Image (cartoon, helix red, strand yellow):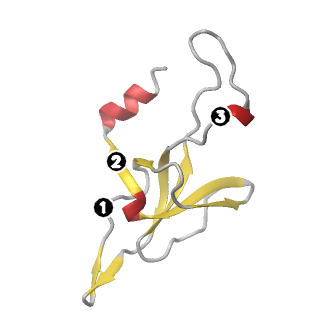
Amino acid sequence: MAVNVTPLHDRVLIKRIEEKESVKGGIIIPDTAKEKPQEGEVIAVGAGRIEKGERIPLDVKAGDRVLFGKYSGTDIKIESEEYLILREEEILAKLSGAAKAATHKK
């Protein structure tokens, strides 16, 4: 289902990208021992912040893959799906195409 949430100002709605549950050795890591992923996909963005009467658009857009801090943002639940809302300044980096491909090769 489509999410009908539009963040305000310079806020961004992100869906965390979960890592695989097992590693090369075949060890399965239980949910309770896993850390929350710090990588996600941008679902929706606000219109941008206002400085000196002008709106400054955000550098990220829906569909971008981003890295964010471990304790950044606020976790929310919409229609049984978990999302994260944070300010654009809490995003550490955008992942390019090469970085996206490398994360899926595990």
> Helix or strand or loop: what does disc 2 sit on?
strand
> Which residue lies at the image location 60% right of the left edge and 27% below the top edge?
20
Residue 83 position within the rendered picture, expressed as x and y whole percent measured from the top left:
61, 56
Crowding at label 3, few (<14), some or many (≥20) Cα neighbours within 10 Å?
few
Circle on res. 94: 2
Q: Residue 34 — which label?
A: 3
Residue at the location (34% across, 33% down)?
A: 99
For the N terminus, the image quarter is: bottom right
Residue 61 horizontal side relative to residue 106, left or right: left
Say what secondary structure mark 1 lies in.
loop
94 to 9, vertically: above or below: above
Q: Are marks 1 and 2 in contact (CB under 8 Å)?
A: yes
Q: Earlier in the sequence, mark 3 or mark 1?
A: 3
N-term-proximal mark, 2 vs 3: 3
Q: Amino acid at mark 2?
A: Lys
Q: Which residue is at 31% across, 31% downward?
A: 98
Residue 38 horizontal/vertical position (percent) = 50, 44
Q: Is residue 7 shown left or right of residue 76?
A: left
Numbered label attached to residue 59? 1
Q: Relative to 49, does residue 85 appear above or below in the rendering?
A: above
Give the x, y percent position of residue 62.
43, 57
Locate residue 75: give its quadrant.
bottom right
